[in-house]
Image (cartoon, grey):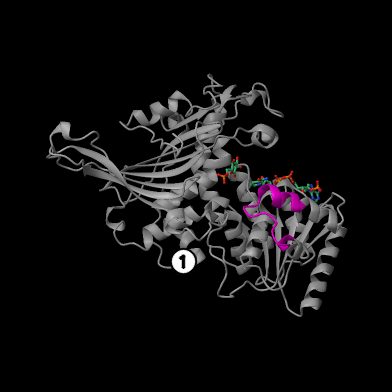
Amino acid sequence: MASNNNNKKPKASVIFIFGGSGDLNQRKLTPALYNLFIDGWMPEKFAIVGLGRTQYSDDKFRDHLSKGIQEFSRRKEKNGIWKDFSQHISYMPMDAEDDASYKSLSDRVKEYEKDWGVNPNVIFYLAVAPQLVPDIAQKLSTIKLCSDTQTTRIVVEKPFGHDLKSARELNKLLTSLFDEDQIYRIDHYLGKETVQNILALRFANAMFEPIWNRNYIDHVQITVAETVGVEERGGYYEQSGALRDMVQNHILQLLCMVAMEPPVNFEANEIRNKKVAVLNAIRKFDRAEVQNYAVRGQYGDGWLKGKKVKGYRQEEKVNPQSNVETYAAVKFYIDNWRWHRIPFYVRTGKYLHQKTSVITIQFRPAPHYAFPAEAAETWRPNRLTISIQPEMDIRLRFQAKRPGQTMSLSPVDMIFSYTEAYPDEHEPEAYETLLLDVMEGNPAQFMRADQVEAAWEVVMPIIEAWEQRPPIDFPNYAPDSWGPEDAEALIARDGHNWINLPTKSE
Ligand SMILES: NC(=O)C1=CN([C@@H]2O[C@H](COP(=O)(O)OP(=O)(O)OC[C@H]3O[C@@H](n4cnc5c(N)ncnc54)[C@H](OP(=O)(O)O)[C@@H]3O)[C@@H](O)[C@H]2O)C=CC1
Ligand SMILES: O=C1O[C@H](COP(=O)(O)O)[C@@H](O)[C@H](O)[C@H]1O
């Protein structure tokens, strides 16, 4: 996102952050709002109100957030900008479970209305543990803080439910209290610049659409690999695991971006309808056949980039016999006309060899290869690689003739790099894009109730099968590896292998 030169800003907004004293706000939310402020995207009139039981004064709260800017923001404090920005921040100590404290929220809104002389957006960001969400939603509704459906919004963080049943219950509650258009279920992958660019790549260029189907594509791979472990998040992760933490949400959303039909327009419901159609078309495995399609792993102890690291079972707040997976790989099929019999291989894991999120579209080989076998180093060169992070680029790989008197071929890459194409522009963090969408009232990149449920329906057979049959080989991969051997076998059975792109330093 470039700086805002056209002066089109969202309307006046009050942003209440439940969990204002927590990690997410310090690490992501306030830095995102700060960067929007620097780029001129914050409304003329806005207020950010942190909420939590911790007894901060406004000044102490600002100090706490200022440390977050220094540590986590892509731009640090410069030229007194933080001072200007922080004047818009205040803190209200409150216990979210205490009914009486909600009155002070509506009093605060009335004060802003009076001071500003406008009816502002009122946004409630629920950056709290999931078990608090129903209670807070209920209390906001009871005091009628969200009765203006045009201006009030509620943002709900992941995890959205623990399984299909709990997600349905939460949706039922939220949609009984608010209009669907007021509910912003956030998946931060959808705010990533490179993820949003998949829409541009596919739907602003005519040349890809004719080949974007089973006739030309052999298979698709989606890798979201992390070099971090679970570390201090053991308490949360024990209830989650890689399938719930990454596949149910981020990875299935990436899959939808690749597989969705062209939208007629970019209206929120049009995009969401197209994505939900993909989720509904994903084949649901019988529990008995899950082992043919899904592999799980858990890291043991070992070495990672020269540092000794603990195994998952030795992490804090983790059961020493835990069967929770820190790695998952799945082969999905989308049973519709476009993707008939085309496998989508996805994988994700902690403590892997490389931090990389990348989508590879592997095209079919040329139908008739007239070149002599010795001409080519590889006969399956045609692929499109969309690197989401940390590299941000799109590469089209094809065969080229090597210079010289013999017909010798080797694969070459045509590369679009963000930093080279747009040297003067900076990529916003996902939370910047999504918070701006919330202020502007644009829910297109947020999850609708049926999307969340459809994604749970996809992973439930795997979760149930894995719960029924505990793993016998955990821990089964070493830190700094690419995961368990079974994941290699999953894809090798089909005659493929996982594509690991070298990093810049390799
Ligand atoms: N941290 C991250 O990077 C990410 C977090 N998330 C999600 O965001 C949510 C918050 O995570 P995170 O910030 O890490 O968690 P933290 O544990 O750091 O923060 C929890 C917050 O909830 C507040 N809180 C707890 N109980 C109450 C209560 N009764 N009344 C008022 N406030 C309360 C705490 O405030 P106090 O103690 O002052 O009461 C604290 O501000 C979770 O759902 C998480 O899954 C999602 C993606 C990334
Ligand atoms: O939602 C989550 O995402 C992060 C990975 O996000 P990224 O933007 O750094 O790729 C993951 O580490 C975490 O476990 C999960 O809860």
Task: Name the amino acid type tagged 1.
Answer: Phe
Residue 341 in which image quadrant: top left
Query: Quarter of the image containing the C terminus?
Result: top left
| Left/right of residue 395 with respect to residue 290 in the rendered view | left
Segment tinted magenta in the rendering:
65-82
Q: Is residue 183 visible?
A: yes
Question: Which residue is located at x 70 percent, y 62 percent?
Answer: 79
Residue 258 in picture, x, y percent from top left: 40, 51
Q: Nearer the viewer, residue 153 or 307?
A: 307
Residue 296 in picture, x, y percent from top left: 51, 29
Q: Secondary structure at mark 1?
A: loop
Q: Is residue 72 magenta?
A: yes
Residue 191 in picture, x, y percent from top left: 54, 55
Residue beneath label 1, please?
Answer: 266
Residue 415 in picture, x, y percent from top left: 36, 50
Q: Give the crowd class for mark 1: few <14, some 14-19, many >=20 residues within 10 Å.
A: few
Relative height, residue 433 to residue 475 (above, below): below
| Left/right of residue 242 with respect to residue 287 in the rendered view | right
| Left/right of residue 466 with respect to residue 87 in the rendered view | left
Relative height, residue 132 to residue 229 (above, below): below
